[in-house]
Image (cartoon, rainbow, N blue to C red):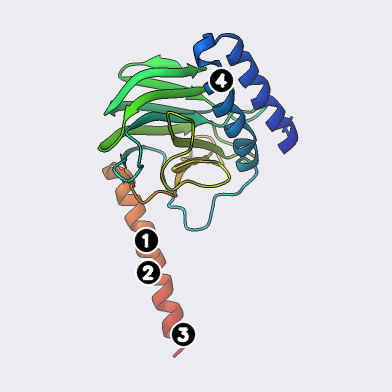
Amino acid sequence: MKLNIRQQGQHLLSAALRALAQTPARKLARTLARKLMLAPALALSLALPLAAGSAPASAATIHVSIDTSTFGAASGYLDMQLSASAGVPLATAVVSNLAGFGALDLNYGWTAVPGGFQFRNDTSNYLSHTATFGGVLSFDLTLDGDYDPLTGYVSHFLVSAFDQDIAPLGTYNPLSLALADFSWTPALTAGGKGSIGAVVSDPGVTVVPEPASLLLLGAGLAGMALTQRRRATGKR
């Protein structure tokens, strides 16, 4: 059964409270502030379609780099979260090959995999690292999942940055607080391929598809260019 926006918000807030019960006292205030900021924003973002101007690619690994030199803070936190709900086709996100990150901070709901972390969209999750800002942070992201003939649920993997006082950093989406939102749209048929979309708010975030994804993305752009040329010709 699909959850409405209000139920999704309640689900995320309940997960935040469960996490708080297991959080050391010295982290309690910071954890509460961050989770309460992100939970309703993420719940609302789940209802949004893939934004116009996002860049679809094949379901494969992409490399994400974040230039933090314009953040205006010396240190803080880099947070990641995969939207989770009940009764939806399974999707997973694997973060690997992290570079420039510090120690684990607030984190739950993920599984350790060789070289990184795996998230599931059926389990409340959160991953935060401490970080020294001023340079470039990077990681690989792989999104995958089951097919869904109705495409009833698009999963969102959000990346956000905060300073030591839990103020969001960079140029971020005012709704989700994310520097970048990577969406997974499942395939329509068994054996088909879903698609990854990237909506980047901060100009310091760059996304580089692997060669297979780059080829498909290039083919898509070529098709768009051909369509535009045909339209232009038709107007003459």
Counting every numbered tag in the picture gives: 4
Residue 153 locus on image (x, y percent)? 62, 38
Q: Residue at x 57, y 33 (%)?
A: 38
Q: Is residue 58 left or right of residue 158?
A: left
**Three-letter amino acid code at the position of disc 2:** Ala
Whole-number angstrom distance, CA of label 4 to CA of label 1 = 47 Å
Q: Is residue 129 left or right of residue 149?
A: left
Q: Is residue 14 left or right of residue 208?
A: right
Label disc, if present, on residue 221 of the rendered structure = 1
**Three-letter amino acid code at the position of disc 3:** Gly
Residue 170 locus on image (x, y percent)? 41, 44
**Three-letter amino acid code at the position of disc 4:** Ala
* Residue, disc 2: 225
Given this view, does label 2 or label 3 mark the residue nearer the observer? 2
Whole-number angstrom distance, CA of label 4 to CA of label 2 = 51 Å
Given this view, does label 4 or label 2 mark the residue nearer the observer? 4
Q: Residue at x 38, y 27 (%)?
A: 95
* Residue, disc 4: 29
* Residue, disc 3: 234
